[in-house]
Amino acid sequence: MTNIHDLYIQRCIDLAGNGLGLVAPNPMVGAVVVHNEQVIGEGFHTAYGKSHAEVEAINQVKDQSLLPDSTLYVNLEPCNHQGKTPPCTDLILRTGIKRVVIGQTDPNSTASGGIDKLRENGVEVITGVLNEASRQLNRRFNTYHEQHRPYLIFKWAQTTDGFVDTLREKPDNQNPAWITGETCRMLVHKWRAEEPAILTGSRTILLDNPQLNVRCWTGKNPLRITIDRKGVLRQDKEEGDRRSPLHIFDGVTPSVIYTCADEENRPNVEFIRISPDEPVWPQVMADLYKRKIQSILIEGGPTLFETLIREDLWDEARVFIGPGWFGIGVKAPHFPFQPTQSETIGNSRLLQFYH
């Protein structure tokens, strides 16, 4: 039989998921107020800078006199610090709520301490209910605070016979072959809107000149990131007898380029100098951590992915298997892991992996 606490924390998790792509760098949080086994208030953190889930749920309770005899459920430890909003622990104590059930503790040392404060003030606190599900929901937030780097999500598409591209003899004049259909493309743009940043390799930029923005969905464009150690990217790329601007330099969306070369910043394009004498990825991860980038969607070629796999720098992979058959081409990354789940998306199969 399912524990009653599990049911309400699952409801918190379901509510919290509505904040994906909207609340970062805050975590996704949902809250439910229960009185005599009846839900009398619920809410979630809707956007960064707006009311926290506990505030939304408590404010929804029409008869506030019921709160001292109610239980508050929340998938993440209530915050205990003054940020853009006051501490949720203070609100809980003012309402007289005597029991709080929590999914996971807060890994952010700045905001944690809510459990101790509540207990010190006589509130019964139950922790660890659906802890793993709560952590999975906020895997970006947890990775950022526990490992001091962004959560890294791989995305690529490959044919049934294991190729990500054809062999393009003149890449400047040949577009990459589409492997998946419109439904998959729309889903990818939805993913872009859910993450604060997107990263691709400099070779992919030279070959494909991707826009790396949100076009087939609605939402904010992610920060565009690339690593150009040798300074091979230029304002323009050659296309036969004409020159076409690289989108990474268009200034429409903020872009960050890590390079060992000396480059001057341009409108909405920032060059970050990295040392050629030190490993690249630790430098990049450290800078992104300082920028409070909690997660990155990585779209690139096999070399980029295999480098990150060797470095053990990945947390999640989303791999489309399209219906095409190239016979020869650019081989997909060697990825010797078992998918956690598989589903059909349009004309393709989507395999999802968690590290």
Image (cartoon, rainbow, N blue to C red):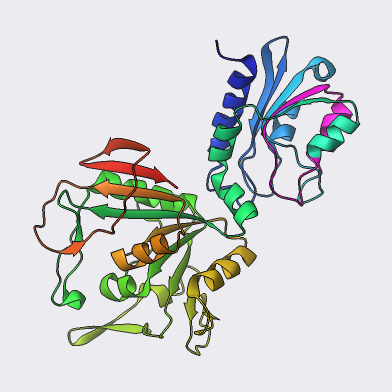
Where residue 342 appears, as percent x and y from the top left, is 31, 37
Q: Is residue 56 visible?
A: yes
Q: Of residues 17 and 320, which is closer to you in this image? A: 320
Magenta stretch holds residue 97: yes
Name the residue furthest right.
121
The residue lying at 36 percent from left, 50 percent from top is: 188
Image height of 207 relative to 62, above or below: below
- Which quadrant holds residue 156? bottom left
Image height of 36 relative to 53, above or below: above
The residue lying at 77 percent from left, 17 percent from top is: 70
Which range is magenta? Answer: 87-113
Where residue 131 appears, as percent x and y from the top left, is 61, 32
- Which quadrant holds residue 101? top right
Q: Of residues 4 and 308, which is closer to you in this image? A: 308
The residue lying at 17 percent from left, 84 percent from top is: 240
Where residue 180 appears, as percent x and y from the top left, is 22, 49
The residue lying at 40 percent from left, 63 percent from top is: 310
Left/right placement of residue 340 relative to residue 127 reads: left
Q: Quadrant of the N terminus?
A: top right
Left/right placement of residue 237 relative to residue 235 reads: left
Left/right placement of residue 19 relative to residue 202 reads: right
Where residue 164 appears, as percent x and y from the top left, is 22, 59
- Which quadrant holds residue 139? top right
Q: Of residues 314 and 213, which is closer to you in this image? A: 314
Name the residue furthest bottom.
262
Magenta stretch holds residue 313: no
Q: Is residue 217 visible?
A: no
